[in-house]
Image (cartoon, rainbow, N blue to C red):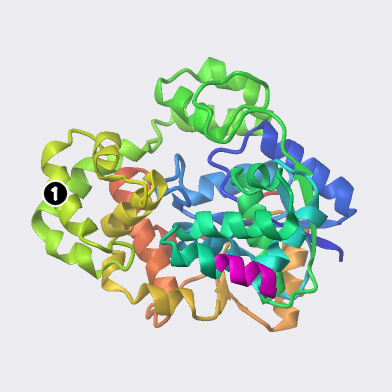
Amino acid sequence: MNVTGIITEYNPFHLGHLHHLKECKKNTNCNGVICVMSGNFVQRGMPAIMDKWERAKIAVKNGVDLVVELPLIFSISSAETFAYGAVALLEKTKIVNNLYFGSEHGNVLDLNKIASVIIKEPIEYKNTLKKELAKGVPYHYARLTSLKNYFNDINLEEIISSSNNILGIEYLKALIRLNSPIKPYTLKRIGSNYNDENITSLYASATSIRKTLSFNDFDKIKKVLPKESYEEIINLKNTDYKFVYPEDIFPFLKYKILTEGENLSKLSQLKEGLDNKIKKEILNSNNLNEFILNIKSKRYTYTAISRALVSFFIGMENFSLDDIKNSSIEYIRPLAFNERGSKILKEIKNKESVKIITKLPKNIENSMLSLDLLGTKAYSILNKNISPMEDYLRSPIFIK
């Protein structure tokens, strides 16, 4: 089989995702698509609007063959760690031939050149980087200056400041680090920016769709969702399903900070007294957005703080997170698949390179997997339709 891997969140699956999927099949000439998808929490440090099983089911109904879960340790990490975990998982299957991702730039060769320089650090680049860091310049600014100097390209800043380009470069870095034979492709992104809050085009951002959903404006989202996505969302609405929004976390997070705030320092993301700032500002904040804005600074972005706070909400401070991130991925967990996806799973099984978990054992000894289960327990607090033990109760969904 010629199998293409894609890395997604589908929060929720919209027309832009459908376009990406159709182009993926056409441009890579594949006869199978495996999707690595974030579970119940996503990379920007917030809960997914729908649980991972619902989102996986919708993805397969729209044409993905197999959806597997990205372990939680990677799904709420920085772009670099998120990308590495997802690519490493695809590589671990030993059956993926291509990686297809969207980017604002749309030229995979240019992005690969940048990724290669960052990984290999040629002397000219490395010397500029050292000089900039010696001035006390933050690392990402030092890297930008070094890359601009190395390539002598005034457009470089625009390339590496766009969110999908950044993620694409991280995918390419991961392929280089893993010495992977997987061939990368990119599709030039169309439509709204990922963080646009209002629906202004047919290819609306997931952010704008979630915001519209929060106002219960189901008619407005109909034009920007594929038929299968819209119908599933309406079915959920009609069964009183609890769509989840970031603000839903706040009362639970506030209580935990007030009662267990001394444990914030266990999170490696919270350095330089940031834990004390969090404990102070929780007393002055009335909602999650206000809370994060009160904490953020030049050094700590809104998203980085969101990820740290959601990690604390889940209970990740009790794990050796750096050790887990650096450990090998030993399993894949299918969430949904079709007939072709079933064949892909059989091919993965025949390779014997990674364990396929469709039913959880009673005793979990793998810390990465333990975190995944903890994520579902935390999500169940926010979504009344999900049991704390849902991972044990649910089997992968087969779509005929």
**Is residue 384 highlighted in magenta?**
no
Residue located beneath label 1 in the image: 255
Seen from the viewer's position, the closer of residues 13 and 100 is 100
The secondary element bearing badge 1 is classed as helix
Residue visible at 49% across and 26% down? 197
Task: Give residue 251's quadrant in the image.
Answer: top left
Where residue 162 appears, as percent x and y from the top left, is 61, 43
Residue 192 is left or right of residue 196, and the answer is: right
Residue visible at 38% across and 57% down? 376
Residue visible at 52% across and 45% down? 54
Seen from the viewer's position, the closer of residues 66 and 203 is 203
Task: Give residue 383's quadrant in the image.
Answer: top left
Magenta portion: prevailing SS class = helix
Query: Label 1 amino acid?
Result: Tyr
The answer to whether 169 is drawn above or below residue 265 in the figure is above
Give, as a single range, the part of the protein colored magenta. 122-129
**Is residue 128 highlighted in magenta?**
yes
* Quadrant of the rendering where the N terminus is positioned: bottom right
The answer to whether 88 is drawn above or below residue 291 in the figure is below
Q: Residue furthest right?
A: 29
